[in-house]
Image (cartoon, rainbow, N blue to C red):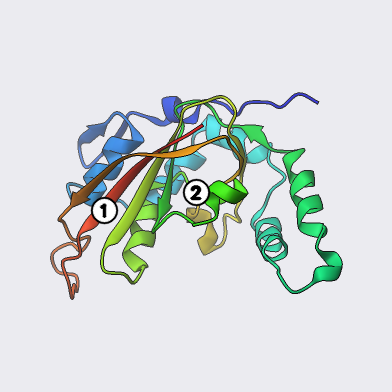
Amino acid sequence: MSIKTLPDLDNSLYPQVWEQQSFESPQALLMALLTQRITIEPLAFTKQLQDNEAYQEWINTSVFGRYIQRSFAAIYHQSEDSFNMDIPVLFRRELMRHAQYLPPSQVLFVAGDMPKKARQEKLFTTTLNPATVVVGAKKLMSAQTVVNQIRVTSKQVLGFPIRHNKRTSERTRNEVLILGFDDLRLVDEQSISKDFEKSGESSSTDRPILLRSYELR
């Protein structure tokens, strides 16, 4: 069975205009959020995604919902049930039958340090929503705030758009589960000494922001 490639989302979604400023790419929009040039609520960006025809095709062709994701995560990382130790592999193999290739140049985001097992397991969860990753990174308790932007650079990256319930808070996750790739490479790292908090909001520290850029192939 041939594997399909998802429609080119970023080229149909950008440029984006926020607060009378135009952003040609997801990387430019993320940088504006990190340096507080603009403020975007995650739900506002989610609505932009939901109005996009390419994104609707992403999620409407997906059989992968949040319930399946939670079940898969629980089973895949179980370590005590040795009797059913083959089930995670079987579950993943079944999901791979429905996975699709991500379009080259697609940009994804991850809040916090990349999972240590991402390269080994060829498995990690990302978001398409730059506002969501900023909020997620802000909530993590650490000495510095880490945000990762990941650009797909080959035609062999397998992923699963996750279809969230539009009536719950999960709708702003806009997640994509990465299920297969050859290489995840750190290509740039820069420190941004800006705080997330806008004036008028509480802020106990001015935590530095570490922006890491990866290529996924």
- Give neighbour class at mark 1: few <14, some 14-19, many 20+ (Cα, 10 Å): some
Residue with the mark numbered 2: 126
Among the two numbered marks 2 and 1 on one chain, the one whose residue lies closer to the N terminus: 2
Decide if residue 29 is in sight here: yes
Q: Is residue 167 above or below residue 51?
A: below
In three-dimensional space, the C-alpha distance between marks 2 and 1, rounded to whole angstroms, equals 17 Å
The reply to whether dot 2 and dot 1 touch (C-beta < 8 Å) is no
Residue 30 in percent (x, y) is at 30, 44
* Left or right of 144, for residue 119: right
Q: Percent position (x, y) of residue 113?
A: 40, 57
> Could you say which quadrant of the image residue 75 lies in?
bottom right
Question: 101 above or below 191?
Answer: above
Q: Mark 1 sits on what residue?
A: 210
Camera-near label (2 vs 1) is: 1
Does 95 appear above or below 24? Answer: below
Residue at the (31%, 69%) spot, across then down: 142
**Which residue shows up at 43% across the image and 30% down it?**
10
Which of the two residues, 46 or 32, is positioned nearer the viewer here? 32
Instruction: Inspect the image, locate mark 1, and give the three-letter code of the amino acid beneath it.
Output: Leu
Q: Nearer the viewer, residue 188 or 44?
A: 188
Which amino acid does the dot numbered 2 rest on? Thr
What percent of the width, then of the height, locates residue 198?
17, 62
Residue 185: give x, y in percent of width and height. 43, 38
Residue at 65% x, 61% y: name it.
73
Q: Secondary structure at mark 1?
A: strand
- SS at badge 2: strand
